[in-house]
Image: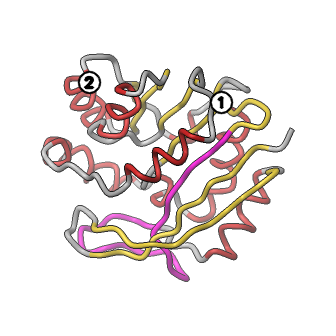
Amino acid sequence: MDERTLQFYSSHAQAYAEREITSRQARLTAFLALLAPTAKILELGCGAGADTAAMLARGIDVHPTDGSAEMAAVASQRLGRPVGTLLFHELDEIEAYDGVWANACLLHVPREQLANVLGLIRRALKSEGMFYASYKTGDADGRDTLDRYYNYPSPDWLRATYAQAGSWSSLSIESGEVRGFDDKQAAMLFVVARKGA
């Protein structure tokens, strides 16, 4: 994880808690529809816990984590349950989850590290497990006006990088736009992959 980006989120944890985003609920609902009601889900980069709260309200067994200890503490207070602090490269579980939800967090992984992180996520999934992630799209990495690092992938680059991480029985990429914390519209790629058997 880029240290300057991580520090940004640690410094703005409370501001994130005060900002609700509901536009992604349709994507979360669609993702959960791919899983059994008894599915165990790992959430990476849970932020202030909005998606976790939505999953808990549906009775989902979700394990929320964030790379920022400050953000995890804010989410834990909001949710009334522990939220783990976990950097992506620290993920060491094997075939433990039916699904992994990684909304707007893997987009901060340095390009040269993303295939390895995706491999760790794939390893943590059970056979045929589902994985969702979203990225700001582009052709080269860089920083935004808030000094956060983004890998800014193209669809082709993402497909090749996911392939480096291991086999997926399916992988779909949709495009769209979201309004970010910087209050700017951003072109996005939404990736849903199923781990191969």
Amino acid type, label 2:
Leu
Disc 1, SS:
strand
Q: Residue at x 63, y 28 (%)?
A: 36
Counting from the top left corner in percent of width and height, residue 142 is at 43, 75
For label 1, count other residues whose C-alpha is less than 10 Å away and answer few (under 14), some (14-19) or many (20+): many
Along the horizontal axis of the image, is 10 left or right of 143? left
For label 2, count other residues whose C-alpha is less than 10 Å away and answer few (under 14), some (14-19) or many (20+): some
Residue 111's place in the image compared with 64, above or below, is below
**How many numbered dots are placed on residues in this image?**
2
Q: Which residue is mark 2?
A: 79
Question: Closest to the observer: 196 or 58?
Answer: 58
Counting from the top left corner in percent of width and height, residue 153 is at 56, 73
Along the horizontal axis of the image, is 38 left or right of 136? right
Residue 8's place in the image compared with 98, above or below, is below
Counting from the top left corner in percent of width and height, residue 195 is at 76, 43
Q: Residue at x 30, y 16 (%)?
A: 81
Question: Closest to the observer: 142 or 56?
Answer: 56
Looking at the picture, the colour scheme in use is secondary structure
**Magenta stretch bounds:** 130-150
Amino acid type, label 1:
Asp
Q: For residue 131: magenta? A: yes
Disc 2, SS:
helix
Q: Residue furthest top?
A: 81
Q: Which residue is mark 1?
A: 98
Q: Quadrant of the C terminus?
A: top right
